[in-house]
């Protein structure tokens, strides 16, 4: 369930564009006005504003925002103003091309493949080709270590069947295959990659249930105890995104704010911006269950200024 709050009366795209143009004029920028407008418009309304702004001022509002904003507010706002497929393509490219990339940054690839619909994954791949003139698979192969390549390429290459069809005999059989590979610490085994990258999400959830029933432990806990480093972290992300994406993103947010002096702003922004119109209400509930504190309180504590106001708008603070 989305967390974004919209005002009872919404101005026309032309009126919003005019106010935004005034806020972006001259040396000074009225960031509060920008956040007040764009932080309370849904994807359709933001698209209308982009189109209208282009017609009125012969300029992309995204380019205008890029030239006028700065810092983490700029990062968050530009992501917000891109349509969802382009946004995820930008996030994937940034993660792949970043020097000294960390495993938490590569989780965005898992989120695109496993916490979204098959159609969205295809749209992201098309956007990636348009923006960067190469395929997402090519860039994974060029920029990711061999130990992770097979799994990540498999995840983004697959178009999973999106109907609720489950074969319980198959689920039991594949749970056994997964258990054998994990016990042998062979997380890159062909059976593991094949099962996790090709089966539909309903089938995989049934497989994970069979795994727990058969071995009296959740599959992600077994992977955790196997100590298989980056590959284990990616696999756990795959399982969590399939079983409970809201729990995955609650964990991403928690990890991004666990220490004030080492905050991971990129992950915090990614989680909030990409899920505000999908399931942020569920994420907030899961976050509270995990930490006994509200996400609103954490954002208030760990961010400041107009950037804080923007994130608060996206997570559903009262207008």
Image (cartoon, grey):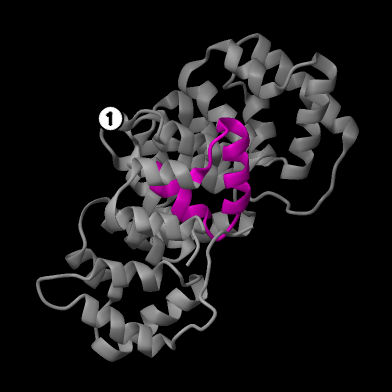
Give the x, y percent position of residue 70: 20, 57
Q: Main secondary structure of the magenta part?
A: helix
Dot 1: within a 10 Å radius of its alpha carbon, few (fewer than 14), some, or many (20 or more) residues? Answer: few
Q: Could you tell me if residue 3 is visible in this image?
A: yes
Left or right of 222 in this view: 294: left
Q: Could you tell me if residue 138 is visible in this image?
A: no
Residue drawn at (59%, 32%), measured in percent from left and top? 290
Give the x, y percent position of residue 82: 40, 65
Badge 1 is on which residue?
A: 261
Q: Eyeballing the image, is 94 above or below 262? A: below
Which secondary structure, mark 1?
helix
Give the x, y percent position of residue 2: 59, 60
Quadrant position of the N terminus in the picture: bottom right
Q: Residue furthest left?
A: 27
Give the x, y percent position of residue 209: 80, 29
Q: Is residue 279 magenta?
A: yes
Q: How many marks?
A: 1
Q: Quadrant of residue 88?
A: bottom left
Residue drawn at (29%, 86%), measured in percent from left and top? 18
Q: Quadrant of residue 285?
A: top right
Left or right of 302 in this view: 48: right
Residue drawn at (27%, 51%), measured in percent from left and top? 72
Task: Look at the image and give the residue range highlighted in magenta.
Answer: 268-295
Foreground: 255 or 168? 255
Q: Is residue 8 magenta?
A: no
Residue drawn at (53%, 53%), measured in percent from left and top? 275
Q: Eyeballing the image, is 235 above or below 299? A: above
Q: Residue furthest right?
A: 169
């Amino acid at each position: 369930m989305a967390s974004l709050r919209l005002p009872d009366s919404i101005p026309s795209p032309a009126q919003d564009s005019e106010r935004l143009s005034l806020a972006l004029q001259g040396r000074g920028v009225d960031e509060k006005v920008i956040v007040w407008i764009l932080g309370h418009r849904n994807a359709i309304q933001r698209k209308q504003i982009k189109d209208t702004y282009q017609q009125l001022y012969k300029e992309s509002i995204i380019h205008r925002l890029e030239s006028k904003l700065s810092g983490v507010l700029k990062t968050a706002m530009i992501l917000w103003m891109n349509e969802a497929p382009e946004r995820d393509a930008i996030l994937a490219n940034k993660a792949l091309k970043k020097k000294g990339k960390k495993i938490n940054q590569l989780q965005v690839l898992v989120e695109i493949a496993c916490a979204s619909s098959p159609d969205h994954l295809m749209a992201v791949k098309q956007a990636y080709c348009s923006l960067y003139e190469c395929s997402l698979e090519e860039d994974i192969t060029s920029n990711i270590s061999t130990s992770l390549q097979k799994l990540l390429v498999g995840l983004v290459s697959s178009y999973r069947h999106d109907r609720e069809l489950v074969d319980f005999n198959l689920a039991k059989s594949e749970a056994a295959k997964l258990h054998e590979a994990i016990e042998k610490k062979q997380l890159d085994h062909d059976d593991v990659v094949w099962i996790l990258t090709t089966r539909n999400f309903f089938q995989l959830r049934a497989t994970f249930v069979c795994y727990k029933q058969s071995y009296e432990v959740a599959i992600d806990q077994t992977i955790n105890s196997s100590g298989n480093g980056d590959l284990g972290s990616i696999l756990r992300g795959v399982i969590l995104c399939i079983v409970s994406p809201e729990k995955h993103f609650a964990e991403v947010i928690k990890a991004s704010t666990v220490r004030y002096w080492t905050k991971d702003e990129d992950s915090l922004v990614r989680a909030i911006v990409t899920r505000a119109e999908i399931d942020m209400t569920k994420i907030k509930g899961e976050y509270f269950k995990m930490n006994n504190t509200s996400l609103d309180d954490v954002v208030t504590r760990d961010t400041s200024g107009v950037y804080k106001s923007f994130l608060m708008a996206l997570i559903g603070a009262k207008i």
